[in-house]
Amino acid sequence: LVTMSSSRLLRSGSAGLSFPLRDGGVCVKRARLSSIWRTNDRVGSAIFSRKVTVDASALGSQAPEHIRRISDEVARLLSKPPAATMPETEGKAWEIKQYPPQERESVITARKLATKLSYLQGETCPHCWLQRNHCICSQVQPLPMRHRLWIYSHLDEVLLAADTSKLLLAAYPQTARLVVNGLPSLEQEMKDALAGSARAFVLFPAENATSFDQLAAAVAPGGTAGDDGSEGEAWDIVVLDGTWEQARKLNSRLDPEIPRVVLGRALDGHVPAHTLRAHPTPFRRISTLEATALLLRDMGLPRGEVAPLLAYLKLADEAYYRQTEHAESRRQTTRDDAWELL
């Protein structure tokens, strides 16, 4: 028996399954929403279809510009119905196929993001993506930045509490732009800005990647990284946000003619500060924010302008640990209460 309402079910990503006990009590167990969909695809599709609308005004005026832009794009994509109404005997896969092939990815992306955006109407802060009880926004102050940052993010990273790109968006509210793969208008805006520009590059260790020093010298012969990076004209920088596998896919979606840049001298001796995602290879533990901070040092930005980013990262990691410890404590209390009923 599914005891949780469909709206709450979608916000939590799981459903409460209740089982009557001999003394009249109820033991509540959790089941992932994906399991319910696998058990009954038609019911799961019906719930999914009812909840794929987004009310941008419900996010409130406090939501940052990049969240409102994503919300507007999701609402636009979901406003177009499929070519045919889904029969009772079919599931969500059938419904997606009723859209033109070139639109299916964007519709799937919009539906997933609609569910993520619904979290913002509850306990999640729209800026730091942590629960409001653990919000760090008051401690993250804007920093000076001349260059334009295009944070090209995999949709799985959006509103993820452990993600670090949110700190770049908070630190550089005027020059950082969030672009989610699968949202065509946002992707096209980024590609238009990068097209034909000699002062644009993607931070990714591709086989043909160069250091920023080499790229700056090629763009302005005789110049140095400091000349071009800290005092010259602004650069358009694409930072990929996701796991390594996701980053490779994001990189493949971008024009191969845009130069790829790898971290240079700033990486030497750097110890990864982000502790939430472990990896046996040290450089693969470097977060999106750390990679960006190291790149900015390679570009000649003063240490005093870059160091606060790592301080913000420490704040976010500590808040995340407090949040997860609090959640685990609440889960343990629920488990203890359930066993007491026995």
Image (cartoon, rainbow, N blue to C red):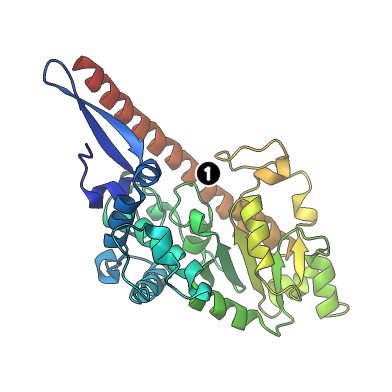
Label 1: state its secondary structure.
helix
Q: Amino acid at mark 1?
A: Lys
Q: Which residue is mark 1?
A: 314
Quarter of the rendering occupied by the N terminus: top left
Q: Nearer the viewer, residue 168 or 155?
A: 155
Find residue 138 and report its image quarter: bottom left
Q: Residue at x 32, y 63 (%)?
A: 52
**Relative height, residue 63 to residue 291 (above, below):** below
Residue 288, image x, y percentages: 60, 54
Q: Is residue 337 visible?
A: yes
Rendered position, 334 above or below 307: above
Q: Position of residue 161 (x, y in %)?
A: 44, 48
Q: Is residue 76 above or below residue 50?
A: below
* Residue lying at 77% horizontally and 74% vertically, measured from the top left: 227
The answer to whether 162 appears left or right of 36 in the picture is right
- The residue carrying pointer 1 sits among few (fewer than 14), some (14 to 19) or many (20 or more) residues within 10 Å by Cα, namely some
Q: Position of residue 244 (x, y in %)?
A: 66, 51
Q: Is residue 112 visible?
A: no
| Residue 39 occupies quadrant | top left
**For the view shown, which residue lies furthest in the left direction?**
24
- The residue nearer to you, when weighing 278 against 114, is 114
Q: Residue at x 69, y 66 (%)?
A: 252
Residue, x 49% and y 46% (percent of image)?
A: 162
Question: Which quadrant of the rendered structure holds the C terminus?
Answer: top left
Q: 202 or 83: nearer the eye?
A: 83
Towards the viewer: 126 or 25: 25
Name the residue furthest bottom. 196
Q: Is residue 316 left or right of residue 278?
A: left
Residue 109: x and y, percent? 46, 64
